[in-house]
Image (cartoon, rainbow, N blue to C red):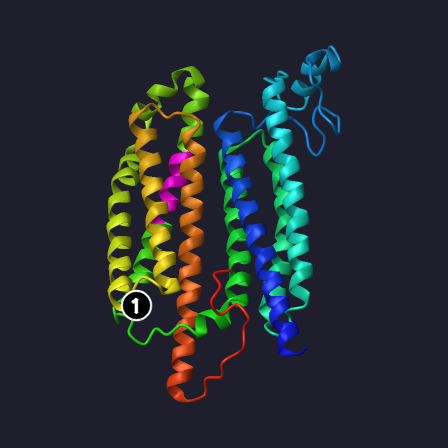
Amino acid sequence: MNTETNNRALQRYRRMAWITLAAVYFLILVGATVRASGAGMGCPDWPTCFGQWIPPTSEAQLPANYQEVYAELGYADTRFNVVKTWTEYTNRLLGVSIGFLIFLTAIYSWSCRQHNTWIFKASLAAFLMVGFQGWLGAKVVGSNLQPGMITLHMLMALAIVGTLLFAVAQARRGLMESQSVANIDPDFEGWLYIVLGLTVLQVAMGTQVREMTDFIREAQGEELRSSWIEAMPWFFYVHRSFSAVVLFSNLWLARLLLISLGWQHTLSKLTIGMIFVIAAAILSGATLGHLGMPALIQPTHLLAASLLFGLQFLIWMSYRHSRDGFASKSSGSFKVEPDVENNATV
């Protein structure tokens, strides 16, 4: 494959992969909205919805004994609600659509395999993971929305995001290797790993808070949402206070980058974006804690946490590629790979 063809293949792949990633994040937002609105069991079966490929629009379209039928299957509280049913059904349609997008991403990655075989391997892995995610979604419905299963479903979505980001980072490797990190602060790498560890810890606590919220909802009911905070265990308050530690550690990381590399370096831009995402996560979390857990804010908080995970993973991969490129230059073995998008951001 000649250089020009290789560059075009990389350019097409990056664009397709970014579109797919945006769609995956949108699905995470929709899924969180489904969960926060209590629409997760709007369709009590899988892959059909009330036994139909296209769900009904009114209870009159269902058999008179449908509640007894689903009660025998373990869903005693099943009651048709057109809003919840179509909310969950739309979530499923989006999931299928994104499966096709990831399949297209894997197809686009085939032409990049000679440039970097990891682009194809990671894209194919993401497609296979989507299949597993679909199976897991069926298990979530079959478990009647057990919190542990929902959390596993969410973690799998983040694993797909991480795999796609790994492929994108490999496709951007030439772009990052061409950006010098000769002047980067020597403390940056250590702080980067500290920040990554703090984020993992914070997300783990947030997952526990999310599961506890589900237990409290089941015990107290939706109508007492404003009092849920009072029933929260101690780790909710640790999670809330720990957000300040996460914010200031990331601000310090950004300071190290901006002073040593300036505002124009890709690593600096990604880190600034990360600070805004952290601010959004803290703001939405404070809103949940002080304004009675408004349902519409819960998806925003989860989306911000997911974006933070993705940005930090991309920063880590991009830094490694820039560092490796600098090391190759220093040893005299660096070879610049032509790229038609050296000044692009995709």
Q: Give residue 216's position: percent from left, percent from top.
A: 40, 25
**Numbered range of the magenta stretch:** 201-210
Instruction: Assess disc 1: are there few (<14), some (14-19) or many (≥20) residues with their C-alpha within 10 Å of its C-alpha.
Output: some
Which secondary structure lies at badge 1?
helix
Residue 167 in sight from this viewpoint: yes
Q: Give residue 87's position: percent from left, percent from top.
A: 59, 27
Q: Give residue 281's position: percent from left, percent from top.
A: 35, 41
Along the line of sight, the residue nearer the viewer: 11 or 36: 11
Can you identify the residue that label 1 sits on? 261
Would you say 295 lies left or right of 119 here?
left
Dot 1 amino acid type: Leu
Which residue is at a point 54% across and 73% down the rendered structure image? 339
Q: Total label count?
A: 1
**Looking at the rendering, which quadrant does residue 219 occupy?**
top left
Q: In this view, does 136 lie above or below 37?
A: below
Q: Is residue 24 above or below residue 234?
A: below
Q: Give residue 276's position: percent from left, percent from top.
A: 34, 47
Q: In this view, does 341 lie above or below 254?
A: below
Along the line of sight, the residue nearer the viewer: 323 or 140: 323
Residue 114 in sight from this viewpoint: no
Residue 205 included in the magenta stretch of the image: yes
